[in-house]
Image (cartoon, rainbow, N blue to C red):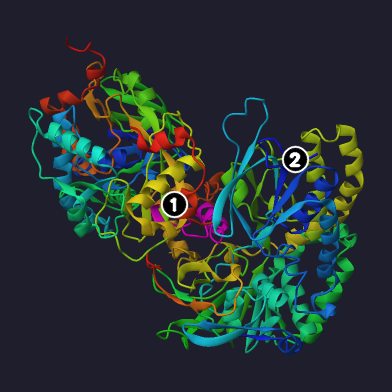
């Protein structure tokens, strides 16, 4: 669980996006992974191997644990993509579907 | 003065815009070479100076003066005339087998920018790929809620996010203490720091203490550590760690972190935790160098693989140099100086400066590098993680992508796997999207321990491009020669 | 593994720990032989770690009907072979035989393919098997994701695929359970035929055996002359690309694209005569990727997570060599570039024959002497 430092919460511009269809907000400049954590979402997917839950781990693009579906495209690295207004972020279940 | 009009896109490509890359690109471009700085992130700084241009954490005392030094590297880059391509992923660096007809020796770089892959041709490449956190394989380290301390620091720098709820930090090494100190400045909650520094490391490190006493970081480091120890609960001599899940939140009641179990003086204790931040040092991020074919060696003192380089950062592959932590851990200030030295040598190799000029210009940078590295041996020795945290028990996952346990690796060794490449083909460890970054060092050490030989003898994964995923459509759109097409369609 | 060799006597030493060697070692040990399997180390030229994992029948054997029959036999025995492995080791090598396709991108190619299949089946001594030449619409019923460039293709119900890396692991586990002495880091330097047996000088010490089987892939070319055999094999490079794990969507293997049991899509391949160079060529990978997208456009958005180049072990005519030495009886060579497809034969048919003492007339066509005698006028 993560929270925003208080002086930032007020000073910054917010970005409206959705997580699994639910409205959410983040700060402009947040990565998708950071935006998920800021919204209390620690689980971003279940693995394709065992189905175990995973969340962001490295936040620098090397571990590939924060994979999510962004605007319909599966397996994107949440920590490497910046959240954008209206973005649809979806958590993932197992293997990517080829049509997504 | 530029490579325009030739078949070269640039004289020099620098990969990574942390301290080494920023300093190398700025120096090389300021001497008239055409330079492109390629970086995966949207803003320069690497991980150590991540978001230094745009962090929302405006109170400078939170991130501290060492962080803000990074901003000083940006002016020289801007003034140098180097081209900066942020948001650019380098997935391949290769020297074609044959030199060009005019005897020049091109380097081809595969990159991906704005969703499109392309090839860039340069004369020289400087890899400044930095470090990543050393894998910390404990039971439960894959649970949501467990992150690297470095990852948490990225969240602080880029987004002003700090943990809320019960928070435990565990491990050893300077970054752990720095983050704890930054959290203190920011008023974040930390319930406990579990210090895993092995007691016996002090005995080994003590003879190296005189060197450390001359380190420029000694004063700062000590103050920071004392601050943290005074204000936070620090539990030392922790010899085992385990993250445990509960059924909570999320989809279908899957496990997320609920508590941390640790052993101290032979007794097990449990702490409730919503967030566990793990750290026990950093290691070179060597995937690109490895896939480029650069030789690497096992560094016993730093207990990691590092690409082999000479005093100028030159690797075993002609035209490919390495600067900064990607060549062996020395820290941000050392990386900056190494970047400058590497740039000078690249200029010399390209015929832009003479040997004498290179050596003369290098003198102050080399002196500064030596100063920055003073005391490193002490830190490396003191913070060498205990074997239990490098060579985990059978039930611990070592390969996060393919969910392969240490026990499975040991079984493969019993079947006759003598190294990580055969283990990879048997078990798929290292075959997932992270390409062994999070399991490679552990797999080497587990095999070495099981075979009772040194990691150097066991070896490391042999990596191939693409070192970062690109889409099949991107790959399909790359330029192809007639020979390439014939190789596929004609037989 | 690193301990010095005991210098002990074995009934058979199999040289090579890849798919051919380990399938033979498994079959030999099952036939009651005391077997050593000598192998190189972690980094070696290992086609068995780079293959495409098809168990493939259609189109093979034009020019040697015996090879077509040998291939069909292995395909027919594969299911039972996989069952035996599962019962013994508890590991599933994911063998499936849903029938395979060779899709085509031009009418001209489709016609040429149809002719090839017909010529193949018109050979004397050919054991026929079912196949179909399909037009686009028929093909699309089986492979709904084909792109607009696909004009049709050929189909053979005998074709299948498996998880070839798991096959390698399973065979290694199996030979361990059968008591085979596996010796990695035992590259064979020289072989001496003496007193009716064989002495091998290896990187790990001397090994002695009554019989030897050369299953060393490319290295058999070096080893074969030491025992009066010949294995004129050359490396031919092939690039392979693998995507991230994807939910099952491609239910039949094709020659160029197949979805693995683990979900990744494996995409091949190329044919390059470049010696022992396994450097990846971006342009070749790109051509492979482009063709795969023409077959299945929706592959374009998948992420490539790995690619590699491996070296096929090719004889001059592309067919296997199986032979016993006449000057050093008890020395056998087995080499092919279809170590997956032929694994069932190697384990269940060839190994028992070697254990029993000889190959017999059936294998005469596979002798390397076919490369030495002048072509009949």
Report whether A94 appears left or right of B389: left
Q: How many marks?
A: 2
Report the chain holding disc 2: B
Image quarter hosting the N terminus of chain C? top left
Question: In the image, is residue A37 part of the stretch drawn in magenta?
Answer: no
Image quarter hosting the C terminus of chain C? top left
Q: Which residues are magenta?
A: B426-450
Relative vertical location of residue C44 with respect to residue C229 in this rendering, above or below: below
- Name the residue carrying label 2: B310
Badge 1: residue crowd in 10 Å (few <14, some 14–19, many ≥20): many
Question: Residue B179's spot in the image, x, y percent?
Answer: 74, 75
Relative vertical location of residue C23 with respect to residue A34 in this rendering, above or below: above
Q: Establish whether labels 2 and 1 are both on one chain.
A: yes
Q: Earlier in the sequence, mark 2 or mark 1?
A: 2
Quarter of the view holding residue B103: top right
SS at mark 2 in the image: loop
Viewer-proximal residue among B258 and C173? B258
Viewer-proximal residue among B275 and A10? A10
Question: Residue C128's spot in the image, x, y percent?
Answer: 8, 38
Q: Residue at x 34, y 34 (%)?
A: C8
Report the chain holding disc 1: B
Q: Residue at x 85, y 55 (%)?
A: B79
- Name the residue carrying label 1: B423
Quarter of the view holding residue B135: bottom right
SS at mark 1 in the image: helix
Relative vertical location of residue B366 with respect to residue B388 in this rendering, above or below: above
């Amino acid at each position: 669980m993560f929270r925003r430092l208080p002086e930032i919460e007020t000073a910054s511009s917010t970005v409206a996006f959705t997580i699994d269809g639910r409205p959410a907000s983040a700060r402009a400049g947040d990565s998708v992974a950071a935006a998920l954590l800021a919204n209390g979402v620690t689980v971003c997917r279940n693995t394709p191997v065992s189905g175990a839950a995973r969340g962001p781990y490295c936040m620098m693009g090397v571990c590939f644990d924060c994979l999510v579906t962004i605007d319909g495209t599966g397996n994107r690295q949440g920590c490497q993509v910046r959240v954008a207004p209206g973005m649809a972020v979806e958590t993932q279940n197992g293997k990517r579907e080829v049509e997504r | 003065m530029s490579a325009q009009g030739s078949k070269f896109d640039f004289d020099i490509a620098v990969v990574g815009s942390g301290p080494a890359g920023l300093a190398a690109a700025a120096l090389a471009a300021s001497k008239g070479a055409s330079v492109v700085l390629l970086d995966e992130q949207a803003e320069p700084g690497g991980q150590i100076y991540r978001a230094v241009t745009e962090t929302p954490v405006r109170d400078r005392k939170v991130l501290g003066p060492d962080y803000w030094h990074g901003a000083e590297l940006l002016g020289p880059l801007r003034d140098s005339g180097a081209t900066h391509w942020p948001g650019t992923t380098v997935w391949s660096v290769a020297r074609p087998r044959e030199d060009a007809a005019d005897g020049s020796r091109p380097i081809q770089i595969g990159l991906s920018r704005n969703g499109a892959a392309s090839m860039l041709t340069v004369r020289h490449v400087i890899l400044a790929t930095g470090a990543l956190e050393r894998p910390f394989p404990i039971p439960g380290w894959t649970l949501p809620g467990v992150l690297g301390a470095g990852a948490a620091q990225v969240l602080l720098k880029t987004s002003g996010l700090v943990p809320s709820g019960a928070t435990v930090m565990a491990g050893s090494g300077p970054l752990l203490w720095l983050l704890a100190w930054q959290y203190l400045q920011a008023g974040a909650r930390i319930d406990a720091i579990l210090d895993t520094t092995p007691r016996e490391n002090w005995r080994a490190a003590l003879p190296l203490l005189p060197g450390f006493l001359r380190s420029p970081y000694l004063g700062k480091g000590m103050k920071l550590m004392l601050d943290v120890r005074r204000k936070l609960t620090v539990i030392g001599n922790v010899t085992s760690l385990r993250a445990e899940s509960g059924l909570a939140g999320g989809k279908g009641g899957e496990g997320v972190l609920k508590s941390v179990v640790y052993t101290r003086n032979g007794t097990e204790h449990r702490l409730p935790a919503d967030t566990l931040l793990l750290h026990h040092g950093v290691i070179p991020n060597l995937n690109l160098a490895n896939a480029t074919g650069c030789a690497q060696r096992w560094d016993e003192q730093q207990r990691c693989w590092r690409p082999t380089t000479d005093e100028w950062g030159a690797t075993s592959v002609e035209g490919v140099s390495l600067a900064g932590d990607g060549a062996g851990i020395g820290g941000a200030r050392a990386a900056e100086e190494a970047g400058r030295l590497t740039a000078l040598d690249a200029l010399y190799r390209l015929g832009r400066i003479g040997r004498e000029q290179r050596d003369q210009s290098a003198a102050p940078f080399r002196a500064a590098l030596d100063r920055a590295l003073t005391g490193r041996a002490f830190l490396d020795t003191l913070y060498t993680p205990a074997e239990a945290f490098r060579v985990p028990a059978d039930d611990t996952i070592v390969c996060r992508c393919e969910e392969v346990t240490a026990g499975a690796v040991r079984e493969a060794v019993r079947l006759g796997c003598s190294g990580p490449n055969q283990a990879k083909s048997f078990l798929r460890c290292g075959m997932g999207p992270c390409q062994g970054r999070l399991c490679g060092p552990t797999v080497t050490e587990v095999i070495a321990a099981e075979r009772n030989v040194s990691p150097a003898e066991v070896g490391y994964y042999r990596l191939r491009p693409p070192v970062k995923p690109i889409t099949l459509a991107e790959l399909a759109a790359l330029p192809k020669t007639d020979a390439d097409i014939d190789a596929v369609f004609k037989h | 593994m690193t301990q010095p060799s005991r210098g002990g006597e074995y009934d058979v030493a199999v040289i090579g720990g890849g798919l051919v060697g380990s399938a033979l070692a498994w079959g030999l040990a099952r036939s009651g032989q005391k077997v050593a399997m000598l192998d190189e180390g972690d980094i070696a030229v290992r086609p068995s770690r780079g293959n495409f994992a098809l168990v493939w029948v259609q189109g093979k054997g034009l020019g040697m009907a015996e090879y077509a029959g040998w291939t069909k036999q292995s395909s027919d025995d594969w299911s039972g072979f996989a069952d035996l492995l599962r019962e013994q080791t508890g590991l599933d090598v994911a063998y499936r035989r849903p029938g395979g396709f060779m899709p085509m991108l031009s009418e001209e190619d489709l016609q040429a393919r149809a002719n090839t299949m017909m010529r193949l089946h018109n050979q004397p001594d050919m054991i026929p098997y079912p196949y179909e030449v399909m037009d686009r619409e028929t093909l699309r019923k089986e492979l709904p994701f084909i792109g607009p460039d696909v004009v049709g293709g050929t189909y053979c119900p005998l074709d299948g695929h498996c998880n070839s890396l798991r096959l390698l692991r399973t065979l290694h586990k199996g030979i361990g359970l059968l008591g085979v002495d596996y010796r990695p880091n035992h590259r064979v330097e020289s072989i001496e035929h003496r007193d009716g047996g064989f002495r091998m000088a290896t990187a790990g010490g001397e090994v002695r055996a009554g019989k030897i089987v050369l299953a060393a892939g490319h290295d058999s070319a070096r080893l074969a002359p030491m025992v009066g055999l010949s294995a004129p094999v050359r490396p031919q490079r092939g690039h392979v690309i693998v995507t991230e794990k994807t939910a099952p969507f491609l239910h039949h293997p094709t020659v160029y694209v197949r979805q693995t049991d683990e979900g990744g899509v494996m995409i091949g391949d190329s044919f390059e005569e470049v010696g022992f160079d396994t450097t990846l060529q971006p342009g070749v990978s790109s051509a492979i990727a482009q063709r795969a997208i023409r077959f299945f456009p929706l592959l374009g958005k998948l992420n490539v997570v790995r690619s590699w180049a491996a070296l096929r072990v090719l004889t001059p005519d592309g067919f296997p060599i199986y032979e016993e030495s006449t000057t050093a009886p008890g020395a056998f060579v087995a080499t092919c570039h279809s170590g997956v497809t032929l694994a069932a034969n190697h384990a269940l048919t060839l190994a028992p024959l070697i254990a029993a003492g000889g190959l017999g007339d059936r294998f005469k066509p596979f002798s390397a002497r076919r490369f030495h005698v002048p072509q009949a006028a």
